[in-house]
C-alpha cells in the first residue's frame, strides 16, 4: 500500500483540494447504511473552507476506502447534530486514490484532515 504523501503520489494530487474524514468507528460499527452515509454526515468543520473541496476521502484505519466528489455542502437538519455539516455528492468507484494510506490520519484526535486547502 502506498502512502498518499509519497513524492510520486503527491505530484498527482498537487492540484486537488481534498478533505479527509476518519470514519473508522462509524464504518466498523455499521452505524449507518453504507459507505456514502458514513462519510457524508455530521462533521464539525469550517463550512466556508470545505466548500472549495474537489474530493472527499473516507478513511478507515489510515486507508482510503472511499472517494467522493461533493456537489454541495450544508448544515445538517438533524437536531441531534445541530451546527454540523454534511455534503451531497457522488462516489468515484474507479478513483486512483482508493486503498492508499494516509498515515497523517492515524492517531489523530481530529477526524478531519484538509489537503491543499
Image: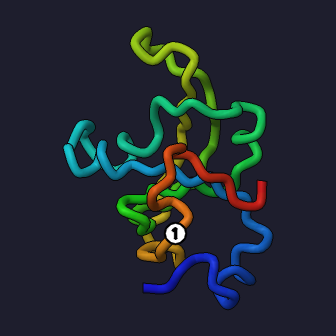
Q: Classify 91 as above or below 10.
A: above
x then y, percent, for residue 29: 20, 44
Question: Horizontal placement of 45 versus 11: left or right?
Answer: left
Q: Classify 10 as above or below 80.
A: below
Q: Mark 1 points at which residue?
A: 102
Q: Classify 30 as above or below 108.
A: above
Image point (37%, 59%), residue name: 60
Residue at the extreme bottom: 8
Image point (43%, 65%), residue name: 62
x then y, percent, for residue 36: 39, 47
Q: Classify 20 as above or below 62.
A: above
Image quadrant where residue 89 sits: top right
Question: Horizontal placement of 83 versus 14: left or right?
Answer: left
Question: Horizontal placement of 20 versus 64: left or right?
Answer: right
Question: Horizontal placement of 54 versus 95: left or right?
Answer: right
How are the colours assigned in the image?
rainbow
Residue at the extreme left: 29
x then y, percent, for residue 35: 34, 50
Amino acid at each position: 500500500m502506498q502512502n498518499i504523501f509519497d513524492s510520486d503520489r503527491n505530484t498527482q494530487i498537487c492540484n486537488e483540494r481534498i478533505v479527509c474524514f476518519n470514519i473508522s468507528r462509524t464504518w466498523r460499527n455499521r452505524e449507518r447504511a453504507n459507505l456514502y452515509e458514513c462519510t457524508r454526515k455530521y462533521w464539525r468543520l469550517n463550512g466556508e473552507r470545505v466548500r472549495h473541496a474537489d474530493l472527499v476521502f473516507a478513511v478507515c484505519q489510515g486507508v482510503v476506502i472511499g472517494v467522493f466528489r461533493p456537489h454541495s455542502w450544508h448544515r445538517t437538519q438533524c437536531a441531534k447534530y445541530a451546527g454540523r455539516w454534511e455534503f451531497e455528492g457522488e462516489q468515484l468507484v474507479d478513483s486512483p486514490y482508493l486503498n492508499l494510506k494516509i498515515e497523517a490520519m492515524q492517531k489523530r484526535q481530529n477526524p478531519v484532515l484538509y489537503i491543499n486547502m
